[in-house]
Image: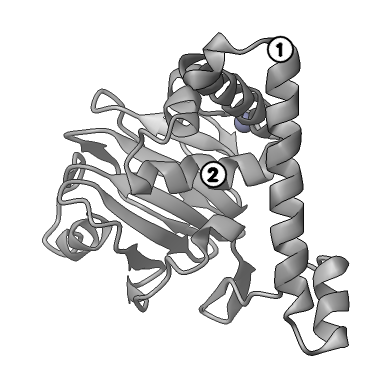
Amino acid sequence: MINYHPDQHLLSLHAKGELPLSMSIAIAAHAEFCPHCQQQLDQMTIALSEQQFEQGDVKNTTAAEQHVEFDDLLSQFLSSTLDALDTDDSVDSVDSKATSQPEIIDNSVTIKGQHYPLPRVFKKQINASWQGIGKVSRLRLDTGEPQARASLLHIAANGEIPDHTHKGSELTLLLAGEFSDCYNTYKPGDFMLLDQDHEHSPKTTEGCLCYTIVDAPLYFTKGISKLLNPIGELLY
Ligand SMILES: [Zn+2]
């Protein structure tokens, strides 16, 4: 059961395509876990496309004319698709297109002997390799944003991250496993956006994989030890 969701504002920005890539990945991945948010995104997308229609040239045409236009467009689209299929020499490939079998993608990561399938949105986003210290490993995503730092973060069983606060906001989307902090226990799909006023130290018993976005370096608040600094480096 997912308890933490992106708010309406974030969902609508995502539907409009106005979020930076790092955050868009988080919303899309959450929606793959969460039928409720997926449905809201679908509704927002339909509403936005209707608005686009109304603002366009079609506003001077009647509803009946719009239907004709749409029907024409659909016919054009279908005939061009069929033309494309006709040019295909192999009957087999036409058949496979017609049945629209899902594309088989290797979209997963392996860390410390654990294999994790990833949400579809991560396809082509994973280009780096893991870096790690102790139980904490990180794989950076290159989203081309100078401020936000997006990563996959893996914490092995019985691992924890020292207490920390952050200068900016920190997003965590749990992809697999579980973790707890002083606020709650989180399950796959949970979407947590913490601001700088929060302080937390996540712990996991069974191990977990998260997608995280940090837009400012993390500052450790308790028992600051030079030994821990490399973890700070790793996280931000
Ligand atoms: Zn949701």
Residue 123 lies, with reference to residue 191, above or below; the image says below
Q: Amino acid at mark 1?
A: Ala
Residue at 56% in and 28% down: 5
Q: Residue furthest bottom?
A: 90
Badges 1 and 2: C-beta atoms under 8 Å apart?
no
Residue drawn at point x = 65 percent, y = 46 percent:
32
Quarter of the rendered image showing ligand 1: top right
Cα–Cα span, label 1 and label 2:
34 Å
- Please state which of residues 104 and 180 is positioned toward the viewer in this rendering: 104
Q: Position of residue 197 (x, y in %)?
A: 25, 23
Mark 2: amino acid: Ala
Give percent across and percent down for residue 139. Answer: 36, 68
Q: Which residue is mark 2?
A: 28
Residue 183 versus residue 87 in the image, above or below: above
Up-down: is 64 above or below 119?
above
55 to the left or right of 131: right
Residue at (71% x, 12% y) in the render: 63
Q: Nearer the viewer, residue 38 or 225?
A: 38
Q: Which residue is at a point 54% across and 31% down the rendered structure image? A: 184
Residue 35 visible in the shown view: yes
Q: Secondary structure at mark 1?
A: helix
Mark 2 nearby-residue class (10 Å; few <14, some 14–19, many ≥20)? many
Q: Nearer the viewer, residue 11 or 135?
A: 11
Residue 150 as seen in the image, left or right of residue 207? left
Compared across the picture, whether 134 is left or right of 64 comes to left
Measured as percent of width and height from the top left, residue 80 is found at: 69, 60
Label 2's element? helix
Q: Is mark 1 within 8 Å of ligand 1?
A: no
Q: Is residue 7 visible?
A: no
Q: Quadrant of the C terminus?
A: bottom left
| Residue found farthest to the left | 226
**Would you name the residue on which mark 1 appears?**
63
